[in-house]
Image (tube, rainbow, N blue to C red):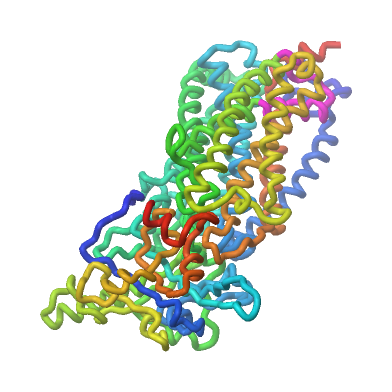
Amino acid sequence: MSSEVKEFKIRWGMVIDIDKCTGCGACMVACQAENNVAPAVDGSNKLRSLNWLTVFRLSNHKPFPDHEVAYLPRPCMQCGKPSCVSVCPVIATDKREEGGIVSQIPPRCIGCRYCMASCPYHARYFNWYDPKWPGDLAQALTPDVSTRMRGVVEKCSFCHHRFMKAQEAAVAKGQDPMNLPDGAYITACTEACPNGAITFGDLNNPTHKVHELIKSPYAFRLLERLGTDPQVYYISKREWVRREGDNYLEHEKTGEATKQG
Amino acid sequence: MDYSKPVDAELFPEGCERCSLTKFMGWMSILGVIFLWGLYAAVRVLGFGLGETGMDDYFGFGLWITFDLAVIALGAGAFFTGALRYILNIDELKNIVNLAAVIGFLCYTGAMMILVLDIGQPIRCWFGYWYPNVHSMLTEVIFCITCYCIVLILEFVPLVLENRQLMKRPFIHALAHNFHVYMPIFAGIGAFLSTFHQGSLGGMYGVLFGRPYLFREGFFIWPWTFFLFVLSAVASGPMFTVLVCTLMEKMSGRKLVSWEVKQLMGKVGGTMLIVYTIFKCLDSWYWATDLLAGQGLTFDQMFHGWIYGKWLFWMEHAFLIIPMVVLLIKSLREKPWIFYLMLFLTCASITINRYVLTVQGLAQPVMPFDSWYAYAPNWAEWASCFLVFAYAAMVLSLAYRYTPMFPQEAELNKK
């Protein structure tokens, strides 16, 4: 509950290669379907649409022919030092389970939205209305994921139910559920990405691909200098993309301030 | 029966005149219409959800939180005046302390009404007590505000009991007397609770390390918005009490509190204003030149366009510095219109402060590729705030008409 960085033996994390992302949105759709995210009452209002994972469009702001764009999928960062956990007055969100996933417990949430105010990534969403699935859409709900009621906050859980299923499968096979092999547990967005831009695994486990990927000189995290210690990493060989990952003063070089601070 | 007096004259405080019951009912009816408009909005919000408001996922806090923070600060006259009157024994303040307590009661109960609408699951409001997160400033706010609300009810009850007809009953007379005997205890508890939640409301913003517009650390103590909120509340609270008193005087056409008492309240608030202004300016300077730069941001990046422009920042500071200077000059503060104007500017500055921390703090995009979005409260949010205004005006009107709120009134209006 406190806002200090918590250490875990397992640290589930995501590495997103921005240079591979085409902005197709398959990850968003997969997330929506997997996690029973209710369709928006007014889909044209993007500030009220529930999207646990949102794809942002980045631009280098240069005129043609130097103009470039990139797409940045933004799930919950599952911060090592989450700004949301310490502020919640009723412990409806916490970070204490092995794996380092920031939980969100809708039946506990009172809907004060203080966690939303605290999150610089806008990764938290509020149920402004009762969730409704038109027609037979309710038949397609994922049975492992609870639907959320009106008046509570929700967010990406790294498909936590898949983690539980993977652990159960490991136990059934007589394997160690706390030492899952690479790929035994992946999120819906990872699975759906047609370009393989998203890699998921245990950041602490040397046998997992993400463990190596985060050591890339092109790897960065969003708003690292705020001290949130995200468990989501991005990779881009384009310097301007990496610079979009944080706030820099004019004289500061990309990544420099983060290393210092 | 004296037919020259209003039909309910027997209920009026001793020696005080009031308007006719018909006129009073007309006034209450106007307020009742506004109240019903707000009630309709409240019912819609509770029935259909917060989608009925103008808030969204970028602006989870809006007019309602601004309103709550502002009225809680302006209602601080209750605890501060109470503490000065009953604990430090500044006797002259007895002439305005009843009004301060009623305003405090109205501000806090009004804020609670708005909070019931503002939280998505009002039926779970008790979770704050049952599952408290001791690390959250909001937990502290929930505890202290609800407890302090009870204290304010206890401070308001004796005033109701002092109604001329009620006091004729020996039991109520004794009860009212005993309430007064224990009033210093209530004042002490109130001062303790109020100081903490005023501070925690400020701390709520100061701890948000993900929000560079709001986060404060490293200077004096972390998060020192805690102390800024306490100081701003004790500066503006007494001033707001004087302004409400003056408004009541203008509306009723009667003198209610002597000019000397108002000046004393002005001095109390003004002294606190000096301390607050110094600390607030230091805070702004440190934030603009040091804290922001440490997060790779500049002062200019905190503002955008007209609606989130720098004018709000400068206005907030000017409305502190000008009253501070003017109230220090005796010849100026003794002119009523200047005196009242300076009190108003201070209250306006505190309200702007609560607005920018709530709305502009959230509007400022932290991710470099994100955008500024505008927030505008819709009719349901305004109507709910007017519900509280109407409720407060109705209770204040009833309290003024039927309780001895102003001990000096009879003396000041002798013909």
The C terminus of chain B lies in which quarter of the figure? top right
B329 over A84 or under it: above or below: above
- Is residue B352 in view from this perspective? yes
Where residue B153 appears, as percent x and y from the top left, is 55, 32
The N terminus of chain B lies in which quarter of the figure? top right
Instruction: Determine if the magenta segment contains residue B257.
Output: yes
**Based on the displayed image, in which of its 4 quarters is residue B45 positioned?**
bottom right
Label tally? 0
Q: In the image, is B402 to the left or to the right of B184?
A: right
Q: In the image, is A162 to the left or to the right of B223?
A: left
Q: Residue at x 85, y 35 (%)?
A: B23
Where residue B336 appears, as percent x and y from the top left, is 80, 21
Query: Which range of residues does the magenta coloring cover?
Result: B239-260
Where residue B291 appears, as percent x and y from the top left, is 50, 44
Q: In the image, is A211 to the left or to the right of B95?
A: left
Residue closer to the observer: B86 or B170: B86
Secondary structure mostly seen in magenta is: helix
